[in-house]
Image (cartoon, coloured by chain):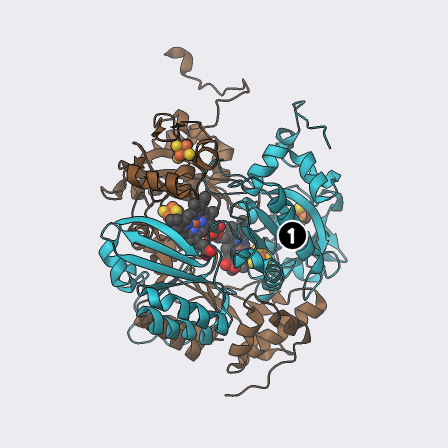
Amino acid sequence: MAATPAKRTTDIGPPHFEQFLPPVIKKNYGKWKYHEIPRQGVLMHVAESGDKLWSVRAATPRLMSIETIRLFADLADEFCDGHLRFTSRNNVEFLVVDEAKIEPLIARLKKEGYPVGGMGASITNIVHTQGWVHCHSAASDASGVVKSVMDELFPYFDGSQKLPAKLRIAFACCLNMCGAVHCSDIAILGVHRRAPAIKHELLNSQCEIPSTVSACPTGAIRPAKVDGHDSVEVIEERCMFCANCYTVCPAMTLNDPVNDGLSIWVGGKVSNARHEPMFSKLAIPFLPNNPPRWPEAVAAVKNIVEVYAGHARKYERMGEWIERIGWPQFFKLTGIEFTKYHIDDFKHAGETFRRSLHFRHSE
Amino acid sequence: MAEKLRETPLLDELQKGPWPSFVTEMKKSAAKNPMANDQMGILERSYKDRIGHWKHGGLVGVMGYGGGVIGRYSDLPKEYPECSEFHTIRVNQPAGWFYTSEVLRKLCDVWEKHGSGLTNMHGSTGDIILLGAKTAALEPTFSDLTEIGFDLGGSGSDVRTPSCCCGQARCEWACYDTMGFTHDLTMHFQDELHRPAFPYKFKFKMAGCPNDCVASVARSDMSIIGTWRDNIQIDQKELNAYVKGGRVDIQEDVVDRCPTGCIKWDGKAFAIDNSNCFKCMHCINVMPKALAPGKDRGATILLGSKAPIIGGALLSSVLVPFIKMDEGYDDIHELAEAIWDLWGEHGMNRERVGEFIQRIGLGNFLEQIGLDPEPEMIMHPRTNPYIFFELDEEEE
Ligand code: HEM
Ligand code: HEM
Ligand code: SF4
Ligand code: SF4
Ligand code: SF4
Ligand code: SF4
């Protein structure tokens, strides 16, 4: 073990945020009056005192080199006295107090490759996870799919294409959903489709057999002796490819170059505006993993966005729109095939079956 | 040090197009750093093989901490030796993600000295993510981080790094000081954050109003979301300006879209039946200059959201319908501790608090932590008659 440094402090916690706030925020903390979006990518906040703050929001790929962070620091020095922040969707916001600096800043950001946008009724950065960049259970890459989708949907980010309301997209590379995709207007989720391939010769040395058995929510795993090794076996018909056993035991591998892929979910939201928060629901059970640009997934997302943009009413989020027109109409309008996989068969599945005669039979 | 870059024909395709490219970021780091170069090589290999090349993490960390570092090893150590150990360090972000250029440069210097130079700004939990450290670099990175005033965030079965929206720092709708509260909570629970002792992870997310810009209701075991109890504030002069301005169709965009139908509008006077308004924010979102949340502000505390693994996804549900947030936070500290005591003792390994409540019943849970049942906690009363009457009920 490496030698302990002489002076070692622990549990100091994060630095207090106050030291990083620009003076205009310190002065007007809790005293903002209203905001406007003077142009796509710029928020203007006006305080009760009359002070103004402009936040210029630029896209980032989230995965960033220190070179880029230093570039942002330089831009912050040049245009906003060194003040910037990051957002809950991994964008960067430059906090400008001198109105004359907004356009030059936007021009510089554009030149450096970090375009501005993503405010109001638009599509902003995709909240996503690590994928093949850094996680062991990933059924797909995250950054590559996100980049491919955002390239295609870019006009909805910079405001050249309009939407009825905001549209939030999220991506997670396996069912652990570190990107918390279960409440997004559109969610892309990596899925496995084959039961774990078990490394019998390693299992007993790498894992505890009882905890591996009890990890399975469907009871598909039982202890077994295979080729003389103490190991486990999986009743394949019972496996729902959740990978919980893999999280507990590395010898239960699910990654599969042919059978892993992406699923698409729609209609979730977290805000309370109008409708209560909703889960995302299954639209497309499986699309192939097709790096480097995942054309099938990109086309599927674009189609859903376009049908929504063409049919929803102003201020109607994806889930509110689908609720109004009904799911049969959603599948008809998008041309997505409805299959048995769309019908829930897990716990409380019955709650998702229809009990009413409220159909729209019209074309 | 100039590096000969790994060949990446597939990844190069992802440098095209208008959206900023993570591949460009990787190349910026790879040009200076051998770890980042091999990491880029192994990702290219994944694109070719259509499979990840990372193994389960082992137990790595810094002394005295049970969390904050996620161990990561590649399964191709011979071919990509520089990134065979590529651990993630979670660094606790300042609340609200505000920085100065000065402090960002200091963070970059630490990471240039010890790691791959790659980061996530930020991870889903909220932390600054430093991607790619060798085991031997962990302690030195940690001591340099504390030197510039930063500490590790949570990982494992502990309190995860609390995070929040920008709140009163830059949003007129914030019904409480999300950033102040988040900092208080993080400091108060340093031990719980750094030394995993729970059945599973426990996340806090703070949103200033029902718009919930940090997705707190979906992504945290305890979601603390600002709201108000009295009347929506109306600025009549600004309302008139909206009427004149014509950019908002008040009938269609506001009145007809109010889910409770509680707004009356005759072309001139605008009246809200506040006793029926359920504080959804819609009208305020559409006319931020004319309308604002009321003055009797506080928060709702909800509990239990999580992703699907294992028992299915959950959204948080109401635990405390309304609590004032400007009179100290002791009650919330105590509430969290009461929950942890109960769940810590009776929760199963890897059972989130939301699942625990499903298993033992919300009614029993409330009784155990000393809260009274209230109708705000449910969508509707039970429909099934299988009531577990307590055995001493008849004697009363
Ligand atoms: C050993 C396995 C795991 C690893 C290495 C891992 C890694 C991570 C990472 C890196 C993040 C930050 C994600 C990002 O920003 O890219 C994260 C967040 C998250 N993880 Fe995991 N994870 C693991 C297991 C799980 C499991 C088993 C679950 C669910 C039961 C889970 C649910 C989540 C969720 C919901 C978040 C988002 C947190 C938030 O929004 O605050 N993860 N995890
Ligand atoms: C004063 C007005 C508002 C401010 C200052 C604000 C601030 C923010 C910021 C900075 C983000 C991160 C955005 C990004 O990176 O692209 C965000 C995300 C979000 N906002 Fe707002 N917001 C406002 C209004 C609203 C409204 C009107 C709604 C809902 C109707 C809303 C719901 C959300 C949601 C759901 C997210 C995404 C959270 C996530 O999944 O990470 N916000 N907001
Ligand atoms: S979603 Fe799954 S694969 Fe992706 S980072 Fe989380 S645990 Fe890893
Ligand atoms: S993947 Fe899930 S369902 Fe399949 S064996 Fe493993 S734990 Fe059970
Ligand atoms: S959650 Fe509410 S208070 Fe917080 S930033 Fe979003 S709109 Fe503002
Ligand atoms: S906050 Fe929502 S419910 Fe209340 S008046 Fe406005 S639109 Fe109606």
Residue A79: x percent and y percent? 35, 71
The shade of chain A is cyan
The shade of chain B is brown
Circle 1 SS class: helix
- Residue extending furthest toward the front: B244
Tell me: B194 left or right of B309: left
- Residue extending furthest toward the right: A227
Residue A278: x percent and y percent? 53, 39
Identify whether A117 is placed above or below B47: above
What residue is rendered at 36% in x and 34% in y? B320
Q: Provide the residue designation for mark 1.
A: A301
Task: Locate residue A51: give its quadrant.
Answer: bottom left
What residue is rendered at 57% in x and 79% in y? B37
What residue is rendered at 27% in x and 41% in y? B325
Tell me: B259 left or right of B49: left
- Residue extending furthest toward the bottom: B1
Identify whether A357 is placed above or below A316: above
Identify whether A272 is placed above or below B25: above
Q: Chain of mark 1?
A: A
Local crowd at mark 1 within 10 Å, few (<14), some, or many (≥20)?
Answer: many
Identify residue type, mark 1. Val
Q: Is residue A246 visible?
A: yes
Question: Which quarter shows the C terminus of chain B?
Answer: top left
Residue B256: x percent and y percent? 47, 31
Residue B78: x percent and y percent? 64, 78
User: Which of the two residues, A211 or B22, is positioned nearer the viewer here?
Assistant: B22
Task: Locate residue B20: give its quadrant.
Answer: bottom right
Identify whether B331 is placed above or below B123: above
